[in-house]
Amino acid sequence: APTPSAPPEDRPRHNLTSFGNCERFLDAYAHELRFVPQFGQWKAWDGARWAPDHAMAVQERGKAIVRGLVDEAQAETDPEIRKLTMKWAMKCEATAAVEAMVELAKSDPRVVRTAEIWDTDPDVLNVANG
């Protein structure tokens, strides 16, 4: 296998694996997603609060990462790495690849939060006017 060239400084190099896809996902979205293992639930920041992800935002973000693999391949200057990345991008256009990425992310400390941190003050309401 070819040795990958160093990535441009503005983007990290990720492996062409499920774990690499998970790292891409977390690098892009960990700031706006949380997973609560006790609830088995993702939460997404809606601009005002951490809301349950009933709209399947996590899966949509996972699909966006897979779509971005094509851009990653096209930006690659090494022809062999470009070819391998494009092949990986096509392989990842499967439900199982997105599910694997999301499943791996569920245990990452950047997104995992315990149930105890939610609604710690029952007398505080989150309202639009403060």
Image (spheres, rainbow, N blue to C red):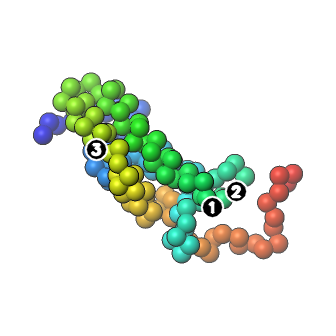
Can residue 105 be seen in the rendering of this structure?
Answer: yes
Query: Dot 2 corresponds to which residue?
Result: 49
Q: Position of residue 110 (x, y in %)?
A: 49, 58
The amino acid type found where label 2 is placed reads Arg
Q: Residue at x 59, y 73 (%)?
A: 115
Residue under numbered circle 3: 91
Which-is-in-front pick, marks 2 and 1?
Answer: 1
Viewer-proximal residue, 60 or 127? 60
Of the image marks 1 and 3, the number of the one nearer the N terminus: 1
How busy is the neighbourhood of tag 2: few (under 14 within 10 Å), some, or many (20 plus)? few
- The reply to whether dot 3 and dot 2 touch (C-beta < 8 Å) is no
Tell me: residue 35, above or below residue 29: below
Cβ–Cβ below 8 Å for labels 1 and 3?
no
Q: Residue furthest left?
A: 1
Sequence order check: which comes first, mark 3 or mark 2?
2
User: Quadrant location of the C terminus?
Assistant: bottom right
Q: Which residue is mark 1?
A: 52
Q: Amino acid at mark 3?
A: Lys
The residue carrying pointer 3 sits among few (fewer than 14), some (14 to 19) or many (20 or more) residues within 10 Å by Cα, namely few
C-alpha gap between disc 3 and disc 2: 36 Å
The quarter of the displayed image where residue 84 is located: top left
Q: Position of 45 compared to 81: left or right?
A: right
The residue mark sitting in front, 1 or 3, is 3
SS under mark 2 = loop
The secondary element bearing badge 1 is classed as strand
* Residue type beneath disc 1: Pro
Residue in the picture at 41% in, 61% down: 103
